[in-house]
């Protein structure tokens, strides 16, 4: 944009001199009106020059004007109610302001008609936050099942996740072929596997577990520093009674499971099913059990000896069988004690009047078991 030329400036100067001459001839009142008109005209000329210079800078620097966000638009709509918007609106067109007003109206009704489930009670919110704080290893499903089985509160895992600080990660499932086979024969199948733990003196201890697939109950768990085929056979004899209903036993191809050990197991009226090479998902239930054992117990302790580890393992197995909810059971408990699960409450998100929830620490407070205590 070009600045005013010298001829334009001379023209403006002539106009000013002309006005001064008129002041000496014309009446005072008419001269004052003409001077005000001239000042307004000169002010308008100055504003036009300023705007042209500003527009030239924008075009030279290739800067695009910033668009106002929704909060600014809503503020302008509210301010338009307080004053005449035509007096303050300079660049924005009336159609633009009307469009902003409609967007603000849409935001208002979107806020008023927020979708979602009805909110739960404050007691349930505090209980969820308390469980999540006291048990950082638990996910939303675990807390929802704990509330359902122990207190009778029917809260969905998604609602529990809403009041938790962290979101649990998705976990992969086993292959469909093996899961279908196990689902049809779960009550007659047992599985076993080894895992390791390191003591404070850097001694490697081996943990042997046997699980019943149908009920997810841990049949046996023991610790040794020197696993052999003879020791493993003795564990099977301690875990399985003489008259049992199991027909299959799943284990991997570890060297401990020798041919002689498999023959001794078959003498106990069990058919051995060896998993394929490098296929841990073929024994997915036992692998999942070992993963749970590590996440909930072994990853948070340093055993001093095999006796210390055996004591901790015994306490965790008791919690796993009788106090830990399992999603695959509905949710349910593998070996539920008397009084569990608790009957559903009349009001879904409310405890009975006068009822309290007590807790019992497990593994020194690493986990907790909750119980509903009704008023006498």
Image (cartoon, helix red, strand yellow):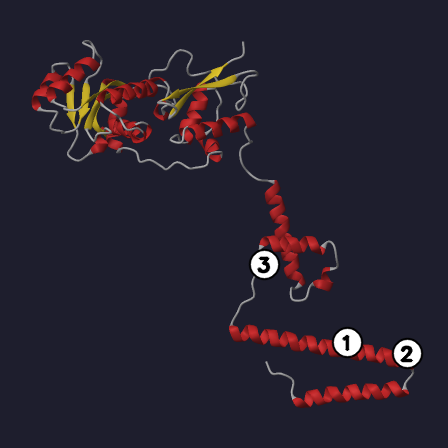
Q: CA distance from mark 3 to mark 1?
A: 32 Å
**Element under disc 1:** helix
Which is nearer the N-term, disc 3 or disc 1?
Answer: 1
**Residue 112 figure quarter:** top right
Image x and y of residue 192, in percent: 21, 23
**Residue 187 figure quarter:** top left
Q: Is residue 167 left or right of residue 27?
A: left
Image x and y of residue 307, in percent: 23, 19
Q: Residues within 10 Å of mark 2 (few under 14, many from 20)?
A: few
Q: CA distance from mark 3 to mark 2?
A: 47 Å
Disc number at residue 40?
Answer: 1
- Numbered disc in front, either 3 or 1: 1
Quarter placement of the N terminus:
bottom right
Q: Is residue 89 left or right of residue 365?
A: right
Q: Residues within 10 Å of mark 1 (few under 14, many from 20)?
A: few
Which residue occupies 53% across, 36% down? 116
Q: Is residue 359 left or right of residue 197?
A: right
Image x and y of residue 283, in percent: 22, 28
**Element under disc 2:** helix
Q: Nearer the viewer, residue 44 or 132?
A: 132
**Residue annotated with mark 3:** 68
**Residue annotated with mark 2:** 29
Which residue occupies 57% across, 40% down? 114
**Residue 361 figure quarter:** top left
């Amino acid at each position: 944009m070009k600045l005013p030329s010298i001829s334009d400036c001379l023209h403006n100067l002539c106009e000013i001199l002309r006005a001064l001459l008129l002041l000496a001839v014309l009446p005072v009142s008419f001269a004052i009106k003409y001077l005000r008109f001239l000042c307004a005209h000169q002010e308008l000329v100055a504003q036009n020059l300023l705007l042209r210079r500003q527009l030239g800078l924008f075009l030279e620097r290739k800067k695009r004007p910033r668009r106002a966000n929704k909060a600014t638009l809503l503020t302008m709509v509210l301010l338009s109610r307080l004053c005449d918007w035509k007096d303050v609106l300079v660049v924005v067109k009336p159609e633009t302001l009307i469009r902003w007003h409609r967007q603000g109206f849409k935001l208002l009704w979107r806020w008023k008609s927020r979708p979602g489930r009805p909110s739960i009670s404050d007691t349930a919110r505090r209980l969820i936050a308390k469980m999540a704080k006291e048990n950082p290893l638990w996910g939303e499903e675990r807390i929802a099942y704990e509330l359902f089985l122990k207190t009778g509160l029917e809260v969905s895992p998604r609602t529990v996740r809403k009041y938790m600080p962290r979101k649990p990660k998705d976990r992969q499932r086993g292959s469909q072929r093996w899961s279908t086979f196990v689902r049809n024969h779960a009550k007659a199948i047992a599985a076993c596997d080894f895992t390791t733990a390191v003591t404070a003196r850097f001694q490697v201890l081996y943990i042997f577990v046997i699980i019943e697939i149908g009920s997810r109950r841990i049949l046996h768990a023991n610790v040794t520093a020197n696993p052999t085929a003879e020791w493993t056979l003795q564990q099977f004899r301690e875990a399985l009674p003489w008259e049992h209903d199991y027909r299959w036993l799943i284990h991997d191809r570890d060297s401990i499971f020798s041919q002689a050990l498999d023959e001794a197991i078959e003498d106990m009226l069990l058919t051995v099913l060896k998993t394929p090479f490098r296929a841990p998902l073929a024994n997915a239930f036992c692998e999942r059990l070992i993963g749970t054992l590590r996440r909930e117990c072994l990853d948070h302790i340093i055993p001093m000896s095999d006796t210390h580890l055996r004591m901790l393992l015994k306490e965790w197995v008791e919690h796993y069988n009788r106090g830990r909810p399992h999603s695959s059971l509905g949710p349910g408990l593998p070996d539920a004690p008397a009084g569990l699960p608790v009957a559903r409450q009349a009001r879904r998100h409310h405890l009975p009047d006068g009822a309290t929830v007590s807790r019992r620490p497990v593994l020194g407070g690493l986990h907790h078991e909750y119980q509903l205590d009704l008023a006498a």
